[in-house]
């Protein structure tokens, strides 16, 4: 059964720093990986979806990479802002294209 | 605007009561999902449906029931058999159950036992 681990569990950085969030998964036979953002008490907002054939995806200041062979993905946030403060979750299918399995998330605080 | 609507936003359940959480989507998505989130925890899958009139159990289905009579709707009933129902419930949908083109989530329902 797929297991997803996110490190660190929490992170606090000053505004303007570049930062990296890590996600690892145990079953590398995945078709894709999706990164989400969750604000307190809210639903999830999709940030990036990386297909297994891709090595990375970019959206604005966000860049996500995927290394299937090592079972790892990273989310890079450039020039962090206080508005980036949220919990970031990564998710992969349990196997193939079955429903997503989620990590516990990284809670990010960007201090002005 | 297309999206997923969950209602109510807050729900209070008395001991021994069944309650139903609503999830409606106008995205024309085939697949729909229910997840449960507890404080400091990741999301755990309760049930999912790949097509109308069909659904499968997830990892924590005990004490829950669902129906999928219409493509747009996937209500979740929390029964009295669910001993610890206090949690944040999230509904999601995706265009296709066999290929992940990305999940869209609703804004959630917070259920509290009183």
Image (cartoon, coloured by chain):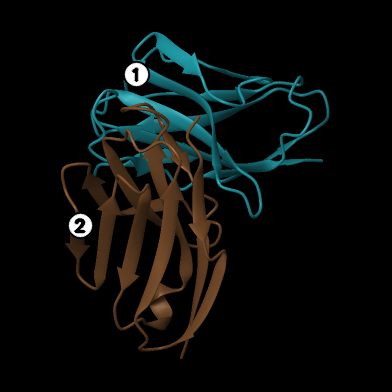
Give the numbered dot on residue A76. none
Which quadrant holds residue B32? top left
Quick check: do tags 1 and 2 share a chain?
no
The residue drawn where x is 65% and y is 46% is: B38
Q: Say above or below: B36 vs A109.
A: above
Where does residue B113 sit, x and y in percent of width and height?
77, 39
The residue drawn where x is 23% and y is 48% is: A50
Mark 2 neighbour density, 10 Å: few (under 14) some (14–19) many (20 or more): some
Disc 2 chain ID: A
| Image-based side of A50 in relation to A74, left or right | left
According to the colouring, which chain is cyan? B
Instruction: Report the residue marked by disc 1.
Output: B50
Mark 1 neighbour density, 10 Å: few (under 14) some (14–19) many (20 or more): many
According to the colouring, which chain is brown? A
| Image-based side of B108 in relation to B41, left or right | left
Disc 1 chain ID: B
Where does residue A13 sit, x and y in percent of width and height?
48, 84
| Image-based side of A18 in relation to A23, left or right | left
| Image-based side of B10 in relation to B25, left or right | right
Q: Say above or below: B28 vs A40.
A: above
Q: Nearer the viewer, residue B75 or A104?
A: A104
Give the quadrant of the C terminus of chain B. top right
Q: Say above or below: B46 vs B39.
A: above
Where does residue A8 sit, x and y in percent of width and height?
53, 66
Instruction: Report the residue marked by disc 2.
Output: A56
The residue drawn where x is 19% and y is 53% is: A55
- In this view, the residue farthest toward the front is A69
- Mark toward the viewer: 1 or 2: 2
The residue drawn where x is 25% and y is 48% is: A49
CA distance for labels 1 and 2:
28 Å
Q: Nearer the viewer, residue B52 or A95?
A: A95
For mark 1, give the secondary structure: strand
């Amino acid at each position: 059964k797929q297991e997803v681990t996110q490190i660190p569990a929490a992170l606090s950085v000053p505004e303007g720093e570049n930062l990296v969030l890590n996600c690892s998964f145990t079953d590398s036979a995945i078709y894709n990986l999706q990164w989400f953002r969750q604000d307190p008490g809210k639903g999830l907002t999709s940030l990036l979806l990386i297909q297994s054939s891709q090595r990375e995806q970019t959206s604005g200041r966000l860049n996500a990479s995927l290394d299937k062979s090592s079972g790892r993905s990273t989310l890079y946030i450039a020039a962090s802002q206080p508005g980036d403060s949220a919990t970031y979750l990564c998710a992969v299918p349990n196997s193939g294209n079955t429903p997503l399995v989620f990590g516990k998330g990284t809670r990010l605080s960007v201090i002005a | 605007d297309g999206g997923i609507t969950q209602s109510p936003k807050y729900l209070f359940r008395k001991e021994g009561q069944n309650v139903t959480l609503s999830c409606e989507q106008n995205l024309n998505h085939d697949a729909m999902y229910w997840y449960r989130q507890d404080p400091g925890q990741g999301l755990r899958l309760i049930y999912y449906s790949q097509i109308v009139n069909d659904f499968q159990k997830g990892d924590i289905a005990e004490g829950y029931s669902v129906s999928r009579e219409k493509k747009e709707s996937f209500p979740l009933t929390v029964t009295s058999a669910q001993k610890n129902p206090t949690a944040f419930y999230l509904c999601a949908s995706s265009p296709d159950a066999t290929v992940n083109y990305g999940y869209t989530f609703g804004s959630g329902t917070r259920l509290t036992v009183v």
